[in-house]
Structure formats: C-alpha cells, structure tokens
Image: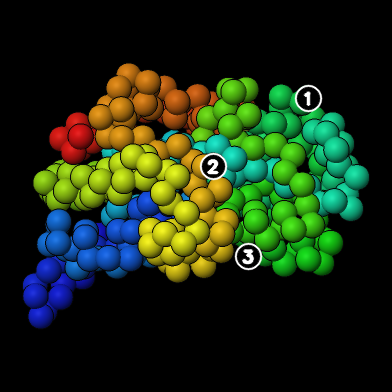
Amino acid sequence: MTVLISTSAMAETIIIGHFGNPTPMQLLASSDAIQKATGWDVEWRKFASGTDVIAAMASGDVVLSELGSSPLAIATSQGVDIQLIAFSDVIGSAESLIVSNSSGIKTLADLKGKRIAVPVGSTAHFSLIGALKHEGIAESEVTIMNMPPDQIAAAWQQNAIDAAWIWQPVQSEILKTGTLLLGAEKTAEWGYPTFDAWVVNTKFGEENKDKIVAFLKEVDRVNKSYLADPAKWTADSEEVKTLASATGADPAQVPEILKGFTFLPMADQVSDTWLGGASKTLKGTADFLKSAGRIDTVADDYTPFVNSTYADAAK
C-alpha cells in the first residue's frame, strides 16, 4: 500500500476516490473539513468509472473511495481486499437510459438492433443489462459499446450511438437532443438495485478506525444538511454553487440532479434493510453478473466484505 508522508507536518497523505457527482460530499472535497476531522493530508481523486477505482485500490494507491454496487460486486468476487462501510448514495434517475431523438426509440422493445453506449462494469451497465433482461431482449440483439462518459458525449454528437445509459453531467448534455426513457429507480423495482458505496482497504480501515469514523461523521453531516431542507439548495445557494464549481455541472441543473439520488443518514444505514442486507445484495448482484457472463466466479458469502461498525460508530 502506498502511503505518502508530508515532511512539513508529518501527516499521512490519503487519496480519497470519488466520481465527481454534484452531491453533498463535494462540500467536503471543496473544504478542509476532512483534514481537520482526521489529521490526514487529503488528496481527492476523481475516477471516470468503478473499474478504475478497483485497479487503484487493488494496487494500494487508493485506500478509501466511492465505488458503485456493480463494480463492488466484481471487485469482491475477484478477492480485492476491500469492505463496504457506508452508502454514499442510492441511485435513482441520476443514472438513466437516454435515447437520441433521431433514433426512433420510443420503448424498450425498440432497442433491438440499436447501438447503446455505457461504461461496461459500472452500475449503469448493470441497470442496462437488467432492463434488457426484464424486456426479454438478448444482449446479442443490441450493440453494447463500452465507453467512458466523455467518449459517450463525443459519440452522441457524431450520431455514432443511438442511446446511452449514463450519469451526470453527460446525462444533461445528451438530453439536449435526447429523451430519458428509463431511470435506475425503475430497474431497482425490477430487482436490479444500484448504489454508490464508501469502501475502504480492509487493513487500512482496521488500523485507522477512529479516522474512518470521523470521515463518515463528516459525510453524514453534509448529507443531513441537504436532507434537512432540500428546497434551500437552489441554483443561487452557496451549497449548489460549490457543488457546481467542484464538478463542472450547471448550477441550474444541480437541484434536479440531487433529486436523482437518495442520501441515507448513518442511523438509517445500519438497519437490516441497508448495511444489514448489503451482503445479500452484493451476492445477488454477483450472481446476476455471472449469469450475464461478466464475471467467472461468485463467492459463497459476501459478509466479510461488509463492515457496519464504522457507520454504527458514526451515526
């Protein structure tokens, strides 16, 4: 594991991974709140997809990060030594299937024969495969094109794709000439739930429990500030301006983007529904990914990859 040392203050430099979504946690990435709470010298690193996070955590360069539920199931099935310690957000319309207005796609059935872009291995990919399965469309009946978000935006402009299952800010960009056909909140109802989790390197977490708890307390604080009165988070509010500045999102769109996520207080996260049921959710996700040919093996038990003690101490 690579841990950098600041010679000036002798503080650990900890790289925290995130996806760059305009969510309340960006208030932390835009301030020194985590540094003050933990004593770490923090570097925030934005990742384009969960597969990039997995590689960074497997190498030891990153020890704490956001990670989507689908890539988390992939990583744990491959034996990457990480644990889910809390939920960053539950994904709803923040990840959706957008279809080009010139594609002729009006229903899910119309996807047959079409070109659909998605970051393969992501939560968006999991939702897409779930939607196809629900509709009875074989993967061989569509062309799934593996692209990172920025390439999706470029391909859309070139009319090289007919649809994309993607998140913000690309989602808002392609909606200018597209239509939202389906959101992840619907595929969750069909049995394919997705979320972004906070995950930690197991050994690092054990050696830094108090600091991980302090980190989660700060995450809980900013999430609660939003949940207390979402209507106050308007385009001209300081909170939304900060989120927009940190992520490059349009301030006018941020309030609607926030509605596409569900943020859970730590006190709710430690329930049987959430962290208590997370190992079962990961097992179900992994089973699905194996049946879809995305992974080769599934663990018998995902309980070792979920640790609720941090969130319980932070609630």
Rendered residue at 41%/22% (across/down) = 280
Q: Give the labeled residue for mark 2.
A: 260
**Image spot of residue 193 (x, y percent):** 53, 30
Q: Give the labeled residue for mark 1.
A: 136
For mark 2, give the secondary structure. Answer: loop
Rendered residue at 31%/30% (across/down) = 269
Q: Indicate how the structure is coloured in the image.
A: rainbow
Task: Measure how far apart labels 2 and 1 are at the Cα level.
Answer: 26 Å
Of the two numbered discs 3 and 1 on the same chain, state the one appearing first in sequence: 1
Visible in this render: residue 40? yes
Task: Measure how far apart labels 3 and 2 are at the Cα level.
Answer: 20 Å
Nearer the observer, 290 or 85: 85
Rendered residue at 15%/35% (across/down) = 313
Residue type for callout 1: Gly
Q: In the picture, which quadrant includes the N terminus?
A: bottom left
Mark nearest the camera among 3 and 2 is 2
Task: Note whether 232 is above or below 3 in the view shown.
Answer: above
Q: Give the labeled residue for mark 3.
A: 150
**Image spot of residue 213 (x, y percent):** 17, 44
**Image spot of residue 261 (x, y percent):** 49, 41
Nearer the observer, 224 or 142: 224
Task: Measure how far apart labels 3 and 1 are at the Cα level.
Answer: 30 Å
Visible in this render: residue 70? no
Q: Which mark is residue 225?
A: none
Residue type for callout 3: Asp
Answer left or right for 3 relative to 117: left
Of the two numbered discs 3 and 2 on the same chain, state the one appearing first in sequence: 3
For mark 3, give the secondary structure. Answer: helix
Residue type for callout 2: Gly
